[in-house]
Image (cartoon, rainbow, N blue to C red):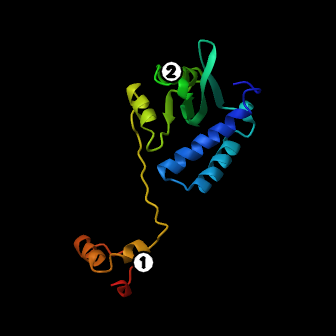
Amino acid sequence: MTAAEYPAWPAAGEQRYLADMARAGSHTPEQAGKKAEEDYRTLLPQGVATPDNTLLVLPADGEPIGNGWLRHGHLPEVTYGYSLVVDPQFRGRGHGRSARAIGEQVTWDVGDRVVRCNVFGGNEVAMSLCTAVGYRVVEETRSRDLAAGVDGCHRLRGGGLARARRRSGFCPAWWSSSHG
């Protein structure tokens, strides 16, 4: 990616990242927007010239069809793929596979030997692509929003939580006899 191509790229990337986080349920849209902006600013402080990053414009027949972002040295000998995008009108033609291969070659060329990436829940196309080209799941994270706090447990006071505690023998430190 050239300095001239860069200015439009972060805004579009932040919007995709925001949408992925919100769709996956890891952040509210407001939280996702703040995190996306902060992550791009922190991870690419010098834009396209930020060391240890490769920003790619993906070509097909001399035409840009998407882009990718690789951060090298994420861990020793590990490149992290932050983004891979094939424009919608070019999808379904094998360009995602080609883009992965380009990213792997760039990773190898900089001396890293492993590529890792994050695919947000619900992105079935990306998950299928990763599986099809030989990537494997090494970590899966799930979460539950406990913004309701203990209130969610209070709904069980009619005996449900007490029964669960008796069965498991577990009594959380925050539990007191006043909870029933």
Q: Determine the residue positioned at 69% across, 45% down.
A: 42
> Could you give the CA–CA distance between mark 1 and mark 2, rounded to whole angstroms?
53 Å
Instruction: Please count the marks in the image.
Output: 2
Is residue 180 positioned above or below 43 on the image? below
Please tell me whether mark 1 or mark 2 is closer to you in this view.
Answer: 2
Which residue corresponds to mark 2?
Answer: 95
* Closer to the camera in the image, 59 or 134: 59
Q: Amino acid at mark 1?
A: Trp
Which residue corresponds to mark 1?
Answer: 174
Q: Amino acid at mark 2?
A: His
Residue 159 on image: x %, y %: 27, 79
Is residue 23 positioned above or below 8 on the image? below
Residue 74 on image: x %, y %: 58, 37
How many residues crowd around disc 2 within 10 Å: few (fewer than 14), some, or many (20 or more)?
A: some
Drawn side of residue 24 relative to residue 71, left or right = left
**Of callouts 1 and 2, which one flags the residue occurring earlier in the amino acid sequence?**
2
